[in-house]
Amino acid sequence: MLLTLIKTRETRYGVHAVLIETNHIFGDKKLADVYIPLDEVPLELIYLVSVPRSGIWLQGKRTRWLWPNRVTRRAVETYLQVIQSTREEIRLEVTSQ
């Protein structure tokens, strides 16, 4: 599975971004809007993602993203945990708009 994190707007404190599930067959699906603090902004690369119970991890480091609400965060994490349980590899591509 490929996720895309698109940086939409930068502030002096961090970056607003959109998390999208990229699917070439059924079309892309927006999962959530997130806010990433400045010291947590990932470089524009592709990262291996793991989703244990404690949240989303990129390359073995826990993300400290701010979600619009707890329900959205939990729904996205649960969805990714289901995908991960099928042993499908999850990768995150970080891009700018």
Image (tube, rainbow, N blue to C red):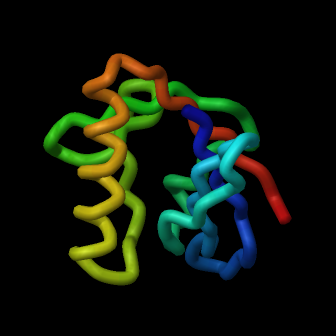
Quadrant location, the N terminus = top right
Q: Residue at x 33, y 29 (%)?
A: 84
Q: Quadrant of the C terminus?
A: bottom right
Residue 24 is situated, as x and y percent measured from the top left of the image, at: 75, 41
Residue 93, above or below 8: above
Spot the residue most to the front.
26
Q: Nearer the viewer, residue 75 or 70?
A: 75
Query: How many labels sit on residues?
Result: 0
Percent position (x, y) of residue 94? 69, 46
The image shows residue 70, relative to residue 50, as above or below, that is below
**Which residue is drawn at the image coordinates 30% and 66% (left, top)?**
73
Horizontal side of 32 relative to 47 (left or right) equals left
Does 7 sit above or below residue 91? below
Residue 89 in the figure: left or right of residue 60: right
Residue depicted at 68% across the width and 56% down the height: 28
Residue closer to the observer: 25 or 94: 25
User: Residue 76: x, y in percent?
Assistant: 35, 58
In the picture, residue 10 is in which quadrant?
Answer: bottom right
